[in-house]
Amino acid sequence: MSDVPYMPQIPAAGERVGATVDYEKNGLLGWIATVDHKRIGILYLLTSLVFFGVGGIEALLMRIQLARPDNDFLSPGSYNQIFTMHGTTMIFLVAMPGLTGMANYLVPLMIGARDVAFPRLNAFSFWLLAFGGLFLYFSFIAGGAPAAGWFSYAPLSEQPYSSTTGVDYYAIGLFVLGMGSIAAAINLIVTIAGFRAVGLTIRRLPLFVWMVLVTQVLILLALPALNASLSMLLIDRLMNGHFFVTDSGGSALLWQHFFWAFGHPEVYIVVLPAFGIISEVIPVFSRKVIYGYEFVAASTVAIAVLSFLVWAHHMFAVGLGHSIDVVFAIGSMLIAVPTGVKIFNWIATMWGGSIRFTTSMLFATGFLVMFTIGGLSGISFAAFPIDWQVTDTYYLVAHIHYVLFGGTVFAIFAGVYYWFPKMSGRMLSERVGKIHFWLMLVGFNMTFMVQHFMGLMGMPRRVFTYPDLPGWAALNMTSTIGAVIMGIAVAIFLWNLIVSFVAGEPAGNNPWDAWTLEWATTSPPPAHNFDLLPPVRSRRPLWDLAHPENPDWEHGH
Amino acid sequence: MDTEGAAERFVTADTYQFAVTLFLISEGAFFAFLIIAYVYFHGSMTSGPNAGNSLNPLKSGIYSVFLLASSFTVSAAERKLSSGHRRAFSGWLLTTILLGAVFLVGQGREYFNLYRADVSVSRNVFGTSFFTLTGFHGLHVLLGLLALCILFALAIGGDFQPGQSNAVRAVALYWHFVDWIWVVIFFVVYVWALF
């Protein structure tokens, strides 16, 4: 349990209470040597932002190449490297560190703790990620980046077909950052289990913390599958092993099973914390408690369990046999149930609320719609005859981007607009933020909505160019223009971050009138987080504090 | 419970034990996949070296007894530390180290003999999956031995006070894991080779 004393009342906005214990150094060394979860969280977020820029540039290069039929802007070889690095970067170096950064910064604050359980291990986790990412990118100057796709299917990823060192850098880089993820998961689970404020029972935990907890369990069990697979791939490549080399008795199929045993839980690893962000943002800006707290939490656990049982839906095209396909199709459709439960929880929370459409809330609402579209195309994939028809086409590219961009990235934007004031002490500009949102929404849908049609028309993914078939040029050009608009939106977002960090409006402790513990301290919080904590008798301790005449705990939640 | 000016909270023994347990769960998942890979290829090698014609379950079984015994000696060391017998504690640690080392020597001899018989990672899929599984396990034993040696050096230097030690608890848990996962591997690799 946390040992921060109770506070009798929230101090006035912007006013620091008590003496700060600043054991952290300032300047560059202070950041490099930091063991403070808040600084490490920000380091994660900045790493994610840098790689978001890199991965975004890779995406733009691909879209420029595909803007016209028979284009020769990129060579086929570079195109393969770029789409491989784009996918690998966005999953492992943007989505995961972005969400881990949020969790690192927020979980101790939300549960009223001074830091995570093991601050040094926390710093170690971050540096494993940073160096794993640098290692992966070093491949570009070491003879060529990996070019076998982000899931590195064997035997394409094996020595005879990928003879540069790219896949070796991929395997070692991901292994290193995978270890970092496991260490971070251990740290967060122990922190949530043992360092909560008095009264903050598991049934009063903020839903973001709930989702982070479930996600860390997924990481703990799924990342070892990736690490084992990568070890085997390296043994094949560096020691002439035979695991996945089909013509000497190995099995390419085994790689697919192993990779997706990691890969499907991974989908939820990068989306559950996003659900958590949405579950914090929507109630605050609807001025209502979350509808069906228990259902949101329990459906998360259901999703986590199911996520380990549906890996082969990525492999319908392999020909595993009818009965196996049926089992995995049913399992995959089942996941839509707990996910749908959440969507209805969020809509019901908004229903009848007095909604404030701040930029954060706009992104959360955008998330609801975009993620639902991605979820629906996902269900269509679960019906394997449809999968056979559209697998490895742009329909799939559209699906994954509606889930991971319209879902995860929109949620991260919602989270950044929501918590930036806490992290920096200053508000992001709402005016610029709204331009960012609308450009992003329009650009995103222009880019990816048309890709559904490209896929249905038969355009395969991962091709560096295409012939001038009827309609293809116009759809591809639309997609490219959309991508450029998204690029502009991201530039505006960066501008907003920088300008607001320097000259934004001061935020005060609790600019959104929110209810969870992170808002009970100054913005930014002192190194030791809290001088005093409010008593926790419900899910909304700050509501109780502000409304002693009508506290939540009188209503039993 | 929580009063004004409460002392800094320290990470407690339970927290360490929980963290190490979580780490070992992830290690278990890692080994599960190596074991599945081995099982997947078992029997696919009808010609050339395979588990049945290359391994010596009896010899490996004898060396395995040493590793298993070390699980009990490390527990004995922990008990001696908590009851305050610091010399006995060091003695049981040393015994554990020696037992683990004997196991590694056995594995080294096995690898050497296989190598002479031209069974290697690159020979065929049996070699690849066998050396990967047992090699990763051997690496874990080696790392455990290093940790035990550090504990032993600290014990000789008089670092441990009687009672519970988080470091000893963490290493002991890890060592139990390394020993008992070997029981699984022994059955899958060596006992199965007999049939």
Image (cartoon, helix red, strand yellow):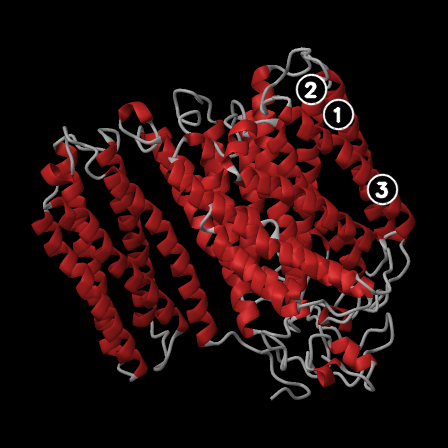
Asked if labels 1 and 3 touch by Cβ distance under 8 angstroms, the answer is no
Please tell me which of labels 2 and 1 falls first in the chain: 2
Q: Residues within 10 Å of mark 1 (few under 14, many from 20)?
A: many
- Residue that label 3 marks: A438
Left of B176 or right of it: where is A198? right
Q: Is disc 3 placed on a helix, strand or loop?
A: helix
* Left or right: where A83 falls relative to B81: right
Spatial CA span between label 3 and label 2: 25 Å
Percent across and percent down for residue A485 are 81, 32
Residue drawn at x 67%, y 86% as measured from the top left: B5
**Residue placed most toward the observer, A197 or A35:** A197
Q: Badge 3 local density, few (<14 within 10 Å), some, or many (20+)?
A: some
The numbered mark at residue A480 is: 1
Residue at the left extreme, as displayed:
B58
C-alpha distance separating marks 2 and 1: 8 Å
Picture quarter with the N terminus of chain A: bottom right
Q: Which mark is residue A66?
A: 2
Residue B152 visible in image? yes
Return the disc, 3 or 1, that comes first in the chain's sequence: 3
Q: Secondary structure at mark 1?
A: helix
Q: Amino acid at mark 2?
A: Leu
Task: Tell me which numbered mark, 3 or 2, is placed earlier along the sequence.
Answer: 2
Q: Position of residue A507 (x, y in %)?
A: 86, 63
Residue drawn at point x = 21 percent, y = 70 percent: B73
In the rendered image, which quarter contains the C terminus of chain A?
Answer: bottom right
Residue A408 against residue A482 in the figure, above or below: below
Residue beneath the point at 47% across and 72% down: B15
**Of A184 and B155, which appears nearest the observer?**
A184
Kind of residue at disc 3: Trp
Q: Chain of mark 2?
A: A
